[in-house]
Structures are given as C-alpha cells and as structure tokens.
Image (tube, helix red, strand yellow):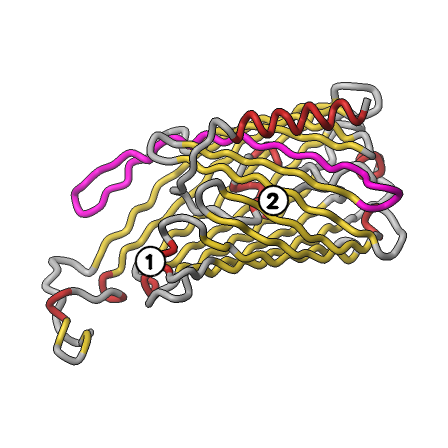
C-alpha cells in the first residue's frame, strides 16, 4: 500500500513538471521550505511543537557591482482553543526584506497569517487546512544610492555630481492578501502533503513616477513526501510551481536524511544532503544538519540559464535555520504529530 501511494505521488510530480516552464518575479528562496508563509498561508501551524521560528538569508550575484540580498524571518504558534484534539489552529507572523543596487531598491513586507487544520479521521492522520494572510508592503527607490550618466567622468562615476533627476526617488506602500488550502496525510513511515495558494488577490497598484501597474495574481501549487528508509533514515521529496501572467517557475528536489544518534522525533540528529532543480534556471545542491529541535541548511545556486552571462557564472548562496519549541511536550496534538511529519 505504501509503495503504491509513493509511486502514484512520484508520477504526479513528473506530470506536473512537464507542464511548467520557468521564470521568476516575486522574492523567492531556494530553501522555500524554511519560508513557508511566503509560499502558502495554509502551511502555518503544521509542525512538531507549539512554537516555530524560521529564517532565511540569501546573497546572490556576488560578481556584479551591487549584489542582491534577501532575508525573511517568521514565528508561528499553535493556539489552545476549544476544538478537537486533532485539529490545529495557528497564527504566524513573517517579515521579509530584499535589497539591491547598493540599497537603491528596497522591498520589505510584514504579514500576519491565521490557519486551521481540520482532522478528517479518528486517528488524526489526514487533515485539510486553510490559511489567510494579510501583508503590509513597502517598496523604495532611492536615487541617492544610484549612479547616473551625468555623474560619469573619465575616471569613473563621481557621486558628488548632480543626477539631473527631478526627484530623489519614490516609495510605494500597500496592503496585500493571500489565501491557501492544504491536505496532509501523516502516517509515520509515509507522509504526504499538497496544497495551493493565491497571492496578490486584490491586485494592488504599484505607482512608479506616474506610471501605474497592477501587481499580477500569483498562483502556487506545491507538494511533498517523506518516506522512511530502513529503521531511521528518511527520503524527502518536494515540488513547487509558481505562475503569474508574466512568468512562472518550477522547483523539484530530493533530500536524504541520515540519522546518526538512533533517536526519533525532536530528539533525533540528522545529516541531510540533496539537490533542488529550478527548471531552465539553476541546480541547487543542499547540505543540512538537524540537532534535535534545531535545523540549519546551506545551499548554493549553480546558474544554468542565460543569466550566467550577466553574473559571470556566480549563483546565490543561502542559509536557513529552524527552531521548534514546546511549552507542553505531552500535549495531545504534539504527541500525535511526533514521528509523523517533517516539512521539506
């Protein structure tokens, strides 16, 4: 039974990949599994613990004059409410910042998320979850951080010279909304999840020096599985596809986890290695270490697209960290999630 489900899931992944060409638009992380609130609001709250802290830092295109840096941090908590022991109600908060061109272009956001996962059986193995998210977004263009043609001299750019621009830049602020749905099957030896989300639902206006453009809606589908190998090791599979009217991106990957202390759940230590592939864009090798409730990962984007010409073959390095906390380790919801679920 387990093998049949696994093969069907793999076939589903392959069929989706064939439909998906690749490009990118919003700020995205190669280790998207450690920035779940930027992928799908319904991912909030489904983890082994009561609290979860996660963060990513990404630096890419180091060979160009002003590289891109992105970072995100999120905090989530499961809420004690008068609901079934197997249901999960959770809230989360996420902050994101993205800088480029020596800080001349800055994008930041702060969002709040609420989700609910309803148990579909008596054992608490299958759940259907929904999530809603509201974000405050700020985008800044600062001309004082940039250089312009009038500042060019025979010996290089002189930033003390006037830019001849009519203003020092501009900023955009607006509210943005997202919603998502997710199904999870957490049986222990085989765990499967899949979901979909819609971002920029209200299609907020972005005004740039008198030019107005509506932000396109972004659709995301994603899924994954963890399969027990032997007594303690685990194989993780994942897939994510994002699409807007302007671009789309597909990422598929596999990670193998080697348990090296013989323990389970949040007491296990695990060495993780694997690779993600963004189709027609990059290959992303990954190394990770899990020490009990703390998980850290390091990845590097090996560019495989035409962007290689601009960035001289240099990709992006990314670091992630996750910390799980439990106020009451014997709480029924946490006990039933243990030994059943690890998200990649």
Locate residue 165 relative to residue 145 in the image: left or right.
left
Residue at 41% x, 43% y: name it: 26
Where is residue 270 drawn, in percent x and y? 78, 54
**In the rendered image, the vertical position of residue 343 relative to residue 273, given as above or below:** above
* Mark linked to residue 212: none
Which span of residues is magenta-colored? 205-233
Q: On the rendered image, what quadrant is the N terminus found in? A: top right
Mark 2–mark 1 distance (CA, rounded to whole Å): 28 Å
Is residue 311 one of those drawn in magenta?
no
**In the rendered image, the vertical position of residue 189 relative to residue 256, given as above or below:** above
Locate residue 299 relative to residue 144 in the image: left or right.
right
Q: In the displayed orientation, state which residue is furthest to the bottom.
A: 155
Judged from the image, the secondary structure of the residue bearing numbered disc 2 is: helix
Front residue of 237/88: it is 237
Majority secondary structure of magenta residues: strand
Q: On the rendered image, what quadrant is the C terminus found in? A: top right
Tell me the residue that label 2 is attached to: 33
Number of other residues with Cα within 10 Å of mark 1, as a class: few under 14, some 14 to 19, many 20 or more: few
Is residue 227 one of those drawn in magenta?
yes
Number of other residues with Cα within 10 Å of mark 2, as a class: few under 14, some 14 to 19, many 20 or more: some
Of badges 2 and 1, nearer the viewer stands: 1
* Mark linked to residue 310: 1
């Amino acid at each position: 039974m387990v093998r049949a489900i696994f093969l069907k899931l793999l076939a589903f992944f392959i069929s989706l990949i064939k439909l998906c060409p690749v490009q990118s638009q919003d700020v995205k992380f190669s280790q998207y599994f450690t920035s779940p609130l930027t992928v799908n609001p319904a991912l909030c709250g489904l983890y082994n613990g009561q609290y979860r802290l996660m963060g990513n830092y990404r630096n890419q295109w180091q060979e160009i004059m002003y590289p891109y840096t992105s970072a995100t941090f999120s905090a989530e908590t499961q809420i004690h409410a008068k609901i079934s022991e197997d249901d999960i109600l959770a809230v989360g908060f996420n902050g994101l910042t993205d800088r480029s061109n020596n800080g001349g272009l800055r994008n930041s956001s702060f969002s709040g998320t609420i989700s609910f996962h309803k148990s579909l059986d008596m054992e608490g193995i299958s759940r259907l979850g929904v999530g809603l998210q509201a974000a405050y977004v700020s985008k800044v263009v600062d001309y004082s951080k940039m250089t312009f043609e009038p500042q060019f001299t025979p010996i290089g750019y002189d930033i003390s010279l006037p830019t001849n621009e009519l203003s020092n830049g501009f900023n955009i602020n607006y509210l943005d909304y997202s919603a998502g749905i997710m199904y999870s099957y957490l049986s222990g030896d085989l765990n499967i999840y899949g979901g979909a989300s819609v971002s920029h639902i209200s299609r907020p206006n972005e005004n740039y020096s008198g030019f107005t453009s509506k932000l396109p809606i972004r659709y995301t589908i994603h899924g994954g599985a963890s399969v027990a190998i032997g007594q303690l090791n685990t194989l993780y599979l994942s897939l994510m596809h994002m699409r807007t009217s302007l671009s789309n991106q597909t990422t598929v990957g596999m990670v193998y986890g080697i348990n090296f202390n013989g323990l389970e759940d949040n007491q296990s230590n695990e060495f993780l290695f694997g690779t993600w592939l963004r189709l027609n864009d990059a290959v992303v090798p990954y190394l990770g270490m899990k020490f009990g409730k703390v998980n850290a990962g390091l990845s590097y984007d090996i560019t495989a697209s035409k962007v290689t010409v601009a960035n001289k073959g240099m990709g992006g390095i990314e670091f992630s960290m996750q910390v799980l906390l439990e106020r009451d380790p014997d709480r029924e919801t946490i006990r039933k999630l243990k030994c059943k679920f690890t998200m990649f």
